[in-house]
Amino acid sequence: MDREAEVYLFGQVLGTHSFLLEDGFLRPDEYAEISEHYFLPGGETGTAATVLDSLGVSVRMDGTWIGTEVAPLLKAFYRDRQVDLSPLRLWEDDPGVMDYVVIADRVRSPMGRFRHLFSCGKRWWSVPREKDIVGCGAAGIDPFFGEESLLAAELCRRHGIPYVTIDCPHDSPLHMHAAVNVISRECLSLHYEGMAEEDVMKRMTETTDGLVVITRGGDEMLYGRKGEKIHRMKPFSVEVKSTLGAGDTFKAGCVYALLRGMSDEETVRFAGACAAVAISRFPLPLHPPRPEEVEKLIRGM
């Protein structure tokens, strides 16, 4: 990596095995034909790094320890990209964290060992370092790593670096101090089951000065800030090839918009266009959104 990092990312960096099926999703006791299979960088942070690099932004990322199978994959993939892997720690006695995703018919099913990993009583991710964050213009922080995620946010606050996070409830410190918090349907189901989305937006915006965005797949997105009315935006219409990485790409789009000083409306539109481009192809890491594609979609061409 030749350029100084513009963006710092902290969170899940995985090796993802993705399987695109030929004749619909898996059915019990029936054979399924695999049309495409890839082993590529993934995870919320890994995917965001790939997308930001494609958008022309230099990235430094940290988070999950990378093992003996994942490390060579990442180093080879990012060798000629503007992504600094130096903060990532090598997990010398483990293959590294991987997931397996089956994709067909606009749906996907991820598999992994995350319950085991998070309950094993051992930390398998890095502690953020101040020197990796200082000098960056924006950041993206995943909430999954407890005190270490909070430390990354605190270091960003200390140095005046705005950050984007995802799926943090209204009473989370990560949410309270974020420049942008992107909430998915999964987060709504987990933390706000039965609540109207408008009521969730009100609760979320009351506890932060940042922008709150609720994404809902193919349905209208909601976004707004404290004291404002709720704004809505329809997602872009594209032919869907795979939804894997859509949310991670939306997050990356928000980080890019934050770095470039976009307005709230511009941020949601740009991030939505990035995600729309992403779901129109497979696999995403080999075909991430390019700036000209995103702008073309925004212009409606």
Image (cartoon, helix red, strand yellow):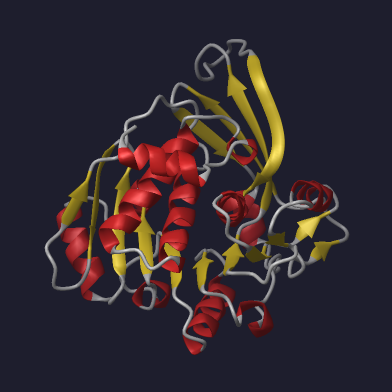
- Left or right of 86, for residue 187: left
Would residue 188 be visible to someone looking at this image?
A: no
Q: Position of residue 118 (x, y in %)?
A: 62, 60
Q: Where is residue 181 in the image (x, y as percent from the top left)?
A: 37, 64
Q: Where is residue 67 in the image (x, y as percent from the top left)?
A: 81, 55
Residue at position x 57%, y 68% from top? 7
Measured along the vertical axis of the image, is residue 188 above or below residue 295? below
Q: What quarter of the picture does the N terminus occupy?
A: bottom right
- Left or right of 263, for residue 15: right
Q: What quarter of the picture does the C terminus occupy?
A: top left
Residue at position x 55%, y 81% from top? 151
- Left or right of 193, for residue 108: right
Measured along the vertical axis of the image, is residue 298 above or below residue 141? above
The front one of 120 and 164 is 164
Would residue 231 be visible to someone looking at this image?
A: yes
In which quarter of the view is residue 273 placed?
A: top left
Q: Where is residue 120 in the image (x, y as percent from the top left)?
A: 68, 62
In which quarter of the view is residue 164 placed?
A: bottom left
- Left or right of 281, for residue 268: left
Residue at position x 37%, y 29% from top? 238
